[in-house]
Every structure is written in C-alpha cells, then in structure tokens.
Image (cartoon, helix red, strand yellow):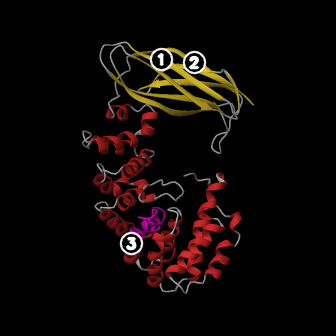
Amino acid sequence: MSANETATPALKEIFNAERLQHIADETRAVYPEFNAKAFLKHANHGLADLSIMQRLARVSESLHAVLPPDYADALQILHALAPRLNSAFVTMSLPHYVASYGAHDFDRSMDALKYFTTFGSSEFAIRHFLRTDLERTLEHMHDWTRDENHHIRRLASEGSRPRLPWSFRLGPVQANPSLAAGILDRLKADDSLYVRKSVANHLNDVTKEHPEWVLDTIEGWDLGNKHTAWIAKHALRSLIKQGDQRALTVIGAGGKPEVELIDVKVEPTEVRLGETITLSFTVQSTVPEAQRLVIDYAIDYVKGNGGISRKVFKLKGLDLVGFGEVDVRRSQQIKDFTTRKHHGGRHEVRVMINGVVMGNGGFNVVV
C-alpha cells in the first residue's frame, strides 16, 4: 500500500455507488429497520473527491448515522453483516466502526476486532487501541498468536508493526521493538505463509531504526526450521540490499564471492522515458567449492540538483556449484513514479554479489 492513496484512482472504486448499494441491501437483510435511503445519501455525498481510505471511513460513519445508538446493538448487526459483504477490503469499514465508536467498551471491541479480521483485516483499527491503551491491547494480541485462525494470528503481528503502510506509526513500538517481541517469537515458525509474511514485514520495519536488535533476535532463533529461515531471509531483505555482512551471514551468503562477472551489458545505452533497459551478465565461479550467492543490482539515479540517489534492486539468490556459471538477465522500464522522477544524464548500474560490487555498466537518460 502506498501513502499516496489517490495515485491509483481505480482502487478507490472499490467503494463506488454500486458497492454502497450492496452494503445497504445486505444491512437491510440482517436489520429490516435499516434506513437504506439515509445511509446512501450520507455515504454518497462528495464521494468522487474522497480517497479510498476516506471512503472506507465514510462507510463507517454512514452506518453509525443510521444504526441503533447502543454500541452493543450496533455490533450485533455488524457481526451479521460481515460474512455477507462481497469484498474483503470493504469489510475493513467494520473494524473502523469499532475504532471510531468503541473505545468506551474495550473488551467488547477487542472481541469485535478479532471477529471482523477473519473477513478482511482489523490491522488499521487495532492501532487506535494500541495508541490509547498499549498494555491491555498487547495482552490481547499476545493471546491471538495462539489462535487456530491464521487471520487472527496475523493481526497480532501486522497490527503491531511500527511502520504499517497507510497508517500512523506506533511510536512506542518504533522506539522499543521488544514491546512486540513476544508476539514475533510465538509466530516465528508459523505454518501459514500469510502470517510469516507479516512477521517478516514487521521485522523489516524494525531494521529501519534497530538493525542490531533484529539481527540479535534472528540469530537466536532456530534457523534449521524452514519456516523460521524463510522469515529471517525476508525480514533482513533491506539489510541484505545494503550489503550488511551480518544479515548476509544469517542467510549463508556472508563469505567473499569467489566469482568473476563476464560480459556485463546494459542495453541500450541511451533511453527515453517509457523505454526499457536490459542488464545481462554471466557469473562464473573461480573455486571448486559451492557458494551461496545473493545477486543484486543498483542504479545511481541522477537527481535534479546533479547529485546521485542509489536504489538497490533484488536479482536472485542461488547456490553456485564449484567452477559453475549462471547467466543472469533483467529488464526494467525507465519511467517516472510519484516517488521518483528521472532526470537526464548518465545513470551508473552496479552489480553486487554478497554486498560486494563486482561489475558495472550504465545508460544515459534523454528527457
């Protein structure tokens, strides 16, 4: 998810007029007294100008405007509505309702978030409770790590991420990652890929401020477990891109690469926006022993002020047999993004193996 919610206009159409009508119809099916006309009038007002997250909030607000004022009664209706909605993302308006109107009824709200997350995710909503009542909320999240449902286990790690995209940062967890360490430890060998991805992303968040803490934590785990090893590799991906030797050692690629690069090419050597470059080369082992290699490449983008901004891209990881060789090829379109604008000039390309620059090339951007 991107912080610039309006960058993908089609995404916000998850909450279009047709979907709002669906929500109204399904709510009326479980609550015949539901004032669908009032809901739709409230929900559709100024809809075109709202981002996707603003539309999600609008659904929650519109439901609150017409549901019974008693929180418990409203939750009972929303419980019945959740399995009837035809989009997992749309169901996230229900946890938003809990975050907006359930702070006074903590235990009931925790139960509601646990239930609603099985239909979409309560990852955004739970953070409001972490911000206002960190200790009690973390107690519930620790309990959720033992749940049979992988959606609920994932909520424990995803909701407590210090840098969850599309949400505010959790300052206390960002400053002190050990607050959520028990959650991560209980999920470090989870058999659900959905959960493992969340644990890895949580740890990758932490590497931004506390890389040594993450490395100390992972080095204390049993990496002989394939699920734990998977988490470790993906959690350390930012450090691996940076060539951090401890991180590379954790995944077995900490040694000096005993290889040569042959015929490094970047083609074409001159491109305009929208065109594609292709990087290709051969990696040849110079020793009889097998080696674990992590191959990345970096592009030194020219900035508007003439400086350089380096971006590292993952290529592949492999085990190269003694005196073996492998051909590597990657194409990339040169185009502007909201986070990157291209400027004319020479762009250097550097091939890195186990964090060591082994070869380079380049291309010129014509704008």
At 30% from the left and 56% from the top, the residue drawn is 182
Q: What label sits on residue 110 in the rendered view?
A: 3
The part of the chain drawn in magenta is 109-131
Q: Amino acid at mark 2?
A: Lys
Q: Main secondary structure of the magenta part?
A: helix
Residue in the foreground of this view, choosing between 124 and 177: 124
Q: Amino acid at mark 1?
A: Thr
User: Farthest residue toward the right?
Assistant: 367
At 38% from the left and 68% from the top, the residue drawn is 114
Residue 279, compared with residue 38, is above or below; it is above
Secondary structure of the residue carrying tag 3 is: helix
Disc 2: CA contacts within 10 A as few (<14), some (14-19) or many (>=20): many
Dot 3 or dot 1, earlier in sequence: 3
Dot 3 or dot 2, earlier in sequence: 3
Residue of label 2 = 265
Residue 108, compared with residue 11, is above or below; it is below
User: Is the residue under label 2 in contact with that under label 1 (CB below 8 Å)?
Assistant: no
Secondary structure of the residue carrying tag 2 is: strand
Could you say where residue 361 lies in the image, as x and y percent from the top left? 58, 19
Could you say where residue 48 lies in the image, as x and y percent from the top left? 71, 64
The answer for how far apart the CA atoms under marks 3 and 1 are is 55 Å
User: Is the residue under label 1 in contact with that under label 3 (CB below 8 Å)?
Assistant: no
The answer for how far apart the CA atoms under marks 3 and 2 are is 56 Å
